[in-house]
Amino acid sequence: MVTSIGSTPTRRRANGGTRRLVAIVTAVMAIQALLLAGCAQATPVTPVAPSTSATSVGTASAAPGLQATPAATSTPVTQFDGVWATRQLTIDQLRSAVQAHGMDPAHFNEVVGPNPGFSDHVVFEVQIRRGRWVEFEVDDGVPAGVGWEGDYTAVGTNTFKAKADKVPCEITYDLTQNAGELAIDITHEDCTDPDDVLIQAAIYESGPFHRVEAADPIIPTPTPSAPAPSPLPSLAPPSTSKDRLTTHEKGTVKGASLGYLDYLPADYDDRALSPLLVFLHGSGESGDGTAVQLRKLTGSAIPYLIDTDRWPDDRPFVVLMPQHDDVPGSPCFTPAEIHSFLGFAIAHYDVDPARVYLTGLSCGAIGMWNYLGAHTSEVLAAAVPIAGYGIAAFDQRGCSLGTLPIWAFHGADDGNVVLRGDVYPIESLQACTDPKAVDARLTVYPNRAHDVWTETYDLSSGYDIYGWMLSHARQP
């Protein structure tokens, strides 16, 4: 994985890089462990009474390892303060930028790869806030660690001098804003490891950046289109849902590339066509698709509700719950994986192709956002991501992403996936006019961390996501 990058005017050839690659891999493993801890078989919690509002105004909490603690509030806020992100970059773009500064392409490969954790599409974010400069990577939506951080001082209107925390390195940056985009150039550097500066050059010169979070982020106020919580039961009454939950091991169903669980509604055989709901789990439930591994899915969220007879018999969905292949460097579902499974599901089950819905949590929501960036409303009628990261999806599709109804949920104190991962794409969609978003909603739970899916899926929060999904059908 790539983590920090910048530019040097000396155009010298870099050398070394082994320790940087070790640090990168270590950071990736640490962040994936964090996601694993947050997503793996969450223990069901006792439902709470619906709050008067699941959105609130207040300062958003920082995500450990991703948002550095701001310096003293006396530090002046500049026009550049906030979080800025690149569009999705490819390895070839990074390699070209580094090569322009004198690094041999073969040496670039030594520094950043071969690395099974590095994808061909990566977003770099730079946080400039109250005297702190932090650059970190989001790889296919998964936070992959801090690459460079330190304190900075303004030495001119557009010039900042940053000193690294952990290594003897001081870099001077020139910042320029134009039409809402930020260009960052390195005009001077004094570092012991030239690779650090050259790799920073690749990031910054593969830009430009655009703002994805304000200088002092706040939890969004309630969106006008979002319904107020209604008094719904904290848990569904006992049903017979577990009797209709079936395990399908990988390789046993023709056309299915993944192992999965399915649930058929009580009246499935009497219906002409049923609505389809596909659920995507978090990273902790990935596996090899065997029966033993597929049982991991029933530890939380929708599979848990079905497996414990808490899924109402009259809820009409065919529910399919695929298991992401547990392979190194791929903690989340990929767009190709999701698209293939949806195609199989529509062909294999008696479902209405106009009423296909997708939902998922954490890594499942991250994979879902990436899928929406690639396919949007080609197949789906509506989507409900929970604790996901959709910045790259909006950047990829722009306002056309709003042709699909999306209702996102996130905890204000999420320390695993940054809150802006759902705030930025939904608020951007809500501001679209050409075309105007069909139905873009955001619910932020105040004082809640990563697991906000339990109360969302069992409806104890008071938000009826199932009724909302069924209110939408894909237009031919």
Image (cartoon, rainbow, N blue to C red):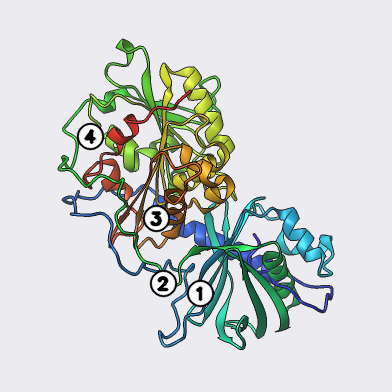
Q: Earlier in the sequence, mark 3 or mark 2?
A: 3
Mark 2 element type? loop
Amino acid type shown at disc 1: Asp
Q: Are marks 2 and 4 in contact (CB under 8 Å)?
A: no
Is the residue 172 above or below the residue 334 in the image? Answer: below
Q: From the top left corner, tell me how far across and down residue 203 is, in percent.
A: 67, 65
Mark 4 element type? loop
48 left or right of 401 in image: left
Q: From the top left corner, tell me how far across and down residue 394 is, in percent.
A: 53, 49
Q: Earlier in the sequence, mark 1 or mark 4?
A: 1
Q: Are marks 1 and 2 in contact (CB under 8 Å)?
A: yes
Q: CA distance from mark 1 to mark 2?
A: 8 Å
Q: Nearer the viewer, residue 436 or 232?
A: 436
Amino acid type shown at disc 2: Asp
Identify the image quadrant of residue 180. Answer: bottom right
Q: From the top left corner, tell me how far across and down residue 383 is, in percent.
A: 41, 38
Q: Which residue is mark 2?
A: 216
Q: Which residue is mark 1?
A: 81
